[in-house]
Image (cartoon, rainbow, N blue to C red):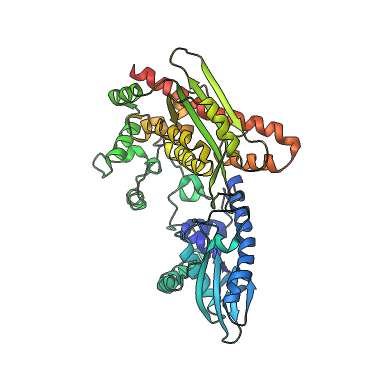
Amino acid sequence: MLTKSDFLLYVDAPMHLWAKSHGQQTNATPSLYDQHLMKQGYDVEKVAKTYLEKYILPKYKNAKLLWQPTYTSGEYQSRADGVIHELDTNVYHLYEIKSSTSTKKEHLPDATFQSIVIGQSINLETIHLILLNDEYIRGDELDIEQLFSVPDVTDEVSEMTPDILAKMRQALEIVKAEQSNSIVNCLNPKTCPCPGLCHPDLPKASIYNIPNLTPKKKRELEDIKVVSIDDIDDDYPLTPKQRKIVDVMQSRTPYLDKPTIAGLFQSLTYPLYFLDYETYDEAIPLYKGHKPYQKMVFQFSLHIVSSNSEAIQHEEYLALEPGDPARDLVKHMRKCISDRGTIIVWNKAFEGGRNKEMAELYPEYKDFLLDVNARMFDLMEIVSKGYYLHPEFLGSWSIKNVLPVMSPELSYKTLSINKGDQAMIEWYDMVNGDESKKEETAKALLRYCELDSLAMVKVWEKLRGLTA
């Protein structure tokens, strides 16, 4: 029996479906973050059911809601979210709930699979998605009538049906295949549930480390048996940025654009503020003024380098109680950052975006937050724009890849909380859960965020030494 989740595994990568069907998934346990997303999905589903009952069902005359019915058609099986049955005309309307704010690429194949299987048992007239409304801003109370948007995807599903029918047949063949020979692998080793099948003997520096390499080019290289970075020919067509990264990895030699980096550093104004945020987002907005999935800043770490002293000052803040965490955070940050000096971050789109959101939420701090953005310098761009590249970065500009190369004495691996998604979940559990673990979790969160901002200091110091 091929279920919808099986089919979506096939769409993701045929090898993933074969591995599941034959008990060869080695990385199938959901991560902490995956579990968090599943919980959010259940939360959205519960509220969406109320929305269907209260606001959608009354639009139909003499109808009833069928909640999560299961349908079988031959070797296929599907469980719907909500199906509305018009009793007088005996027609049905499918409503599929998605905990996202827009239609994602997998949603239409998902809905099409549903409509094909369900349509064999009932007279299915229309297909709809129920999405979170990204324009909804919460007031004092949650308004579920405004929380959702309901696009009609009947025409899109109809157009996609022949292609999905063919893929459904192919997926069944994959399930029944005894061997995995010639079954198509995935293109993302980092998240692969069966790396031994999709990416056996993968070298440390592989084609999957090339940033923004298209799926088409990855397949082209796989087809000619090129997986290692070392095997990419000099004349293989890459973007200039990709070619520079490949050259660095092949030569095992760092690349340094000394004049550009020196010029950028000369533009910095002391004191230097190395700033890092940690955030939490919730599908259904928790607090007034928030949108679905709005990132709430619950923590910052700030290292301050003065112009007249080698001593580095450290400031930090962590919200410890339930409720909107950011107002007191901004208030504390305002005391730590003067009206002069450059604010250095790793990915200004992230910190800058949070500042814009907080400026709207807390207008009394709007001028301060927008001024922080105006004085912001993105240290990550030194790597992401290719001014400094190292073969051990492996094509990445994540601080967690850069720091071990530039400051090997520091490590995230020794921390009990060492990833952003883990910090997010641990914080939420801390402020809403067991008081006995609060002190321990708070210390771990502070150590993690402190390393993020200290890492920027160390990278800046290293680059300054290289360009002196």
Q: Residue at position x 67%, y 34% from top?
A: 441
Q: Residue at position x 60%, y 79% from top?
A: 85
Residue 414 in view, yes or no = no
Task: Give how far across and how far down residue 418 sits, in percent.
Answer: 57, 34
Image quadrant for the N terminus?
bottom right
Task: Give how far across and how far down residue 135 sits, in percent.
Answer: 49, 56
Task: Give how far across and how far down residue 9 sits, in percent.
Answer: 51, 59
Task: Give how far across and how far down residue 158 sits, in percent.
Answer: 43, 74
Q: Residue at position x 63%, y 36% from top?
A: 319
Which residue is at the front of the view, 145 or 205? Answer: 145
> Residue farthest to the front?
364
Q: How many numbered discs sit on the rendered protein? A: 0
Which residue is at the front of the view, 444 or 219? Answer: 444
Examine the rendered structure and indicate whether residue 431 appears above or below residue 9.
Answer: above
* Quarter of the image where one finds residue 88: bottom right
* Quarter of the image where one finds residue 98: bottom right
Decide if residue 365 is on the left or right side of residue 319: left
Residue 46 in view, yes or no = yes
Q: Residue at position x 49%, y 50% from top?
A: 197
Decide if residue 241 is on the left or right side of residue 463: left
> Residue farthest to the left?
235
> Residue farthest to the bottom?
88
Image quadrant for the C terminus?
top left
Decide if residue 250 is on the left or right side of residue 77: left
Examine the rendered structure and indicate whether residue 328 appears above or below residue 22.
Answer: above
Decide if residue 38 is on the left or right side of residue 255: right
Examine the rendered structure and indicate whether residue 455 appears above or below residue 364.
Answer: above
